[in-house]
Image (cartoon, rainbow, N blue to C red):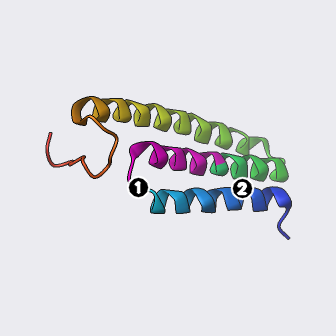
Amino acid sequence: MITSMHFTSLCAFIISTLGFLLHQAHLIPTLLCLEGMMLSLFMALAMWSIQLEASSFMLTPMLVLTFSACEAGMGLSLLVASSRTHGSSHLQNLNLLQC
């Protein structure tokens, strides 16, 4: 039986994944979709650890949230670096083979 909170986190993850797959023109929407995926995973893990009522699983959502914050910081630094060097945030203008 799926509850409304599980359904909400599942829908948020699916919508973020579809947004990530379909909107890859700019770097900002791509980063926002990645953040949505990480936050929905955080919600799912938090609900899972509350349902299990085990203290050993309570740290897992906080680790996911920490990695999500690190990912957001790295993404924003890449956005600033690419807009300074290339002049825009278009992903088609970025070539990873050229430094």
Q: Position of residue 84 (x, y in %)?
A: 27, 28
In the visual, does 37 lie left or right of 59? left
Residue visible at 63% across and 57% down in the picture: 13
Closer to viewer: mark 1 or mark 2: 1
Secondary structure mostly taken by the magenta-highlighted segment of the chain:
helix
- Snapshot quadrant of residue 55: top right
- Snapshot quadrant of residue 35: top right
State which region is magenta.
24-39
Tell which of 45 and 30 is nearer to you.
Answer: 30
* Callout 2 secondary element: helix
Q: Count the marks.
A: 2
Residue type for callout 1:
Gln
- Give the residue at the far bottom of this rendering: 1
Tell which of 34 and 46 is nearer to you.
Answer: 34
Residue visible at 42% across and 32% down in the picture: 76
Q: Earlier in the sequence, mark 1 or mark 2?
A: 2
Circle 2 packing at 10 Å, graded few (<14), some (14-19), many (20+), is many
Circle 1 packing at 10 Å, graded few (<14), some (14-19), many (20+), is some
Residue type for callout 2:
Ser
Q: Position of residue 12 (x, y in %)?
A: 67, 56
- Give the residue at the far front of this rendering: 87
Q: Which residue is mark 2?
A: 9
Q: CA distance from mark 1 to mark 2?
A: 23 Å
Q: Position of residue 36 (x, y in %)?
A: 59, 48
54 to 79, vertically: above or below: below
Q: Image quadrant for the N terminus?
A: bottom right
Q: Which residue is mark 1?
A: 24
Residue visible at 63% across and 45% down in the picture: 39
Q: Residue 68: which numbered mark, if any?
A: none
Residue visible at 38% across and 30% down in the picture: 77
Q: Position of residue 44 (x, y in %)?
A: 71, 53
